Image (tube, grey):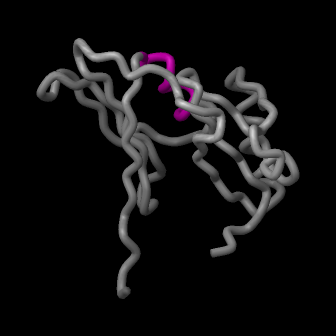
Amino acid sequence: MTHVPKLRVARPTDDLAALLPFYRDGLGLEVLYQFTDHDGFDGVMLGSPGAPYHFEFTTAHGHTAGRAPTPDNLLIFYLPDRKDWQAALDRMAAAGYSAVPAFNPYWDRQGRTYEDPDGYRVVIQHAAWEA
Protein backbone atom coordinates (compact mmCIF):
# COMPACT_ATOMS: atom_id res chain seq x y z
CA MET A 1 0.00 0.00 0.00
CA THR A 2 1.46 3.34 -1.02
CA HIS A 3 -0.74 5.55 1.11
CA VAL A 4 -2.43 5.41 4.49
CA PRO A 5 -6.22 5.28 4.23
CA LYS A 6 -8.22 7.83 6.16
CA LEU A 7 -10.62 6.61 8.83
CA ARG A 8 -13.95 8.13 9.82
CA VAL A 9 -15.71 6.67 12.85
CA ALA A 10 -19.39 7.60 12.60
CA ARG A 11 -21.86 7.09 15.41
CA PRO A 12 -25.35 8.29 16.26
CA THR A 13 -26.24 10.08 19.46
CA ASP A 14 -29.38 11.45 21.04
CA ASP A 15 -27.63 14.54 22.42
CA LEU A 16 -24.94 16.28 20.36
CA ALA A 17 -24.78 19.16 22.85
CA ALA A 18 -23.83 16.80 25.71
CA LEU A 19 -21.33 14.85 23.59
CA LEU A 20 -19.45 17.82 22.13
CA PRO A 21 -17.71 18.98 25.35
CA PHE A 22 -16.40 15.46 26.05
CA TYR A 23 -14.64 15.13 22.70
CA ARG A 24 -13.75 18.81 22.16
CA ASP A 25 -12.87 20.08 25.63
CA GLY A 26 -11.94 16.82 27.34
CA LEU A 27 -10.11 14.96 24.57
CA GLY A 28 -8.92 18.15 22.88
CA LEU A 29 -10.27 17.36 19.41
CA GLU A 30 -11.19 20.24 17.13
CA VAL A 31 -14.53 20.78 15.49
CA LEU A 32 -13.77 20.24 11.81
CA TYR A 33 -17.31 20.64 10.48
CA GLN A 34 -20.87 20.94 11.73
CA PHE A 35 -24.17 20.63 9.91
CA THR A 36 -27.84 21.12 10.69
CA ASP A 37 -30.81 19.44 9.03
CA HIS A 38 -28.88 17.73 6.25
CA ASP A 39 -31.52 15.28 4.97
CA GLY A 40 -32.93 15.06 8.50
CA PHE A 41 -29.60 14.80 10.32
CA ASP A 42 -27.63 17.19 12.51
CA GLY A 43 -23.98 16.42 13.10
CA VAL A 44 -20.45 17.34 14.00
CA MET A 45 -17.07 16.05 12.88
CA LEU A 46 -14.13 16.26 15.27
CA GLY A 47 -10.46 15.46 14.94
CA SER A 48 -7.03 16.97 14.56
CA PRO A 49 -6.38 18.86 11.33
CA GLY A 50 -4.18 16.74 9.07
CA ALA A 51 -4.70 13.54 11.08
CA PRO A 52 -5.80 10.48 9.08
CA TYR A 53 -8.94 10.06 11.20
CA HIS A 54 -11.93 11.93 12.50
CA PHE A 55 -15.11 11.22 14.38
CA GLU A 56 -18.61 12.04 13.19
CA PHE A 57 -21.55 12.17 15.57
CA THR A 58 -25.06 12.56 14.18
CA THR A 59 -28.60 12.91 15.42
CA ALA A 60 -31.40 11.74 13.14
CA HIS A 61 -34.59 13.73 13.59
CA GLY A 62 -37.32 11.48 14.97
CA HIS A 63 -35.03 8.53 15.78
CA THR A 64 -33.54 7.33 19.06
CA ALA A 65 -29.90 6.17 19.09
CA GLY A 66 -29.76 4.86 22.65
CA ARG A 67 -26.69 4.14 24.74
CA ALA A 68 -23.60 2.01 24.20
CA PRO A 69 -24.44 -1.69 24.09
CA THR A 70 -21.56 -2.71 26.42
CA PRO A 71 -18.84 -1.05 28.53
CA ASP A 72 -16.25 -2.65 26.23
CA ASN A 73 -17.03 -0.48 23.17
CA LEU A 74 -13.76 1.46 23.08
CA LEU A 75 -11.84 4.11 21.23
CA ILE A 76 -8.17 4.00 22.26
CA PHE A 77 -5.68 6.84 21.94
CA TYR A 78 -2.05 5.74 22.34
CA LEU A 79 0.17 8.42 23.86
CA PRO A 80 3.69 7.06 24.46
CA ASP A 81 5.13 10.33 25.78
CA ARG A 82 4.45 10.63 29.51
CA LYS A 83 4.02 14.42 29.37
CA ASP A 84 1.48 14.15 26.53
CA TRP A 85 -0.37 11.38 28.38
CA GLN A 86 -0.51 13.35 31.63
CA ALA A 87 -1.61 16.49 29.76
CA ALA A 88 -4.49 14.49 28.25
CA LEU A 89 -5.55 13.25 31.71
CA ASP A 90 -5.28 16.78 33.10
CA ARG A 91 -7.41 18.14 30.23
CA MET A 92 -10.13 15.54 30.94
CA ALA A 93 -10.11 16.47 34.64
CA ALA A 94 -10.24 20.20 33.85
CA ALA A 95 -13.26 19.56 31.62
CA GLY A 96 -14.96 17.76 34.52
CA TYR A 97 -14.51 14.12 33.47
CA SER A 98 -13.27 11.41 35.83
CA ALA A 99 -11.79 8.06 34.87
CA VAL A 100 -13.95 4.96 35.31
CA PRO A 101 -12.73 1.39 35.91
CA ALA A 102 -12.17 -0.39 32.61
CA PHE A 103 -14.35 -3.41 31.87
CA ASN A 104 -11.18 -5.23 30.73
CA PRO A 105 -8.55 -4.64 33.47
CA TYR A 106 -5.80 -4.62 30.82
CA TRP A 107 -6.64 -0.98 30.01
CA ASP A 108 -6.16 0.12 33.65
CA ARG A 109 -2.52 -1.06 33.69
CA GLN A 110 -1.17 1.71 31.45
CA GLY A 111 -4.21 3.82 30.75
CA ARG A 112 -7.28 5.59 31.96
CA THR A 113 -10.79 4.98 30.69
CA TYR A 114 -13.48 7.66 30.39
CA GLU A 115 -17.15 7.26 29.55
CA ASP A 116 -18.85 9.72 27.24
CA PRO A 117 -22.46 10.89 27.82
CA ASP A 118 -23.77 8.04 25.62
CA GLY A 119 -21.93 5.36 27.62
CA TYR A 120 -19.22 4.73 25.01
CA ARG A 121 -15.72 4.59 26.41
CA VAL A 122 -12.42 6.15 25.45
CA VAL A 123 -9.07 4.91 26.73
CA ILE A 124 -6.09 7.23 26.98
CA GLN A 125 -3.28 4.69 26.90
CA HIS A 126 0.27 5.47 27.99
CA ALA A 127 1.97 3.18 25.49
CA ALA A 128 3.25 3.09 21.94
CA TRP A 129 1.12 1.67 19.15
CA GLU A 130 2.42 -1.82 18.50
CA ALA A 131 0.91 -3.08 15.27
Q: Is residue 38 magenta?
A: no
The residue closer to the viewer here, 17 or 87, is: 17
Residue 32: x percent and y percent? 36, 42
Relative placement, left or right, of 97 versus 110 is left
Relative placement, left or right, of 82 versus 5 is right
The residue closer to the viewer here, 99 or 28, is: 99
Residue name at image x 24 percent, y 29 percent: 35
Establish if 36 lies above or below 45: above
Residue name at image x 76 percent, y 28 percent: 93
Establish if 103 lies above or below 125: above
Residue farthest toward the left in the current orientation of the protein: 39
Residue 53: x percent and y percent? 43, 56
Quarter holding residue 38: top left
Residue name at image x 36 percent, y 70 percent: 5
Residue name at image x 68 percent, y 58 percent: 78
Quarter holding residue 42: top left
Residue farthest toward the bottom in the current orientation of the protein: 2
Q: Is residue 16 visible?
A: no
Q: Is residue 61 visible?
A: yes
Q: Quadrant of the N terminus?
A: bottom left
Q: Main secondary structure of the magenta part?
A: helix
Establish if 19 lies above or below 82: above
For the record, the magenta segment spans 15-24
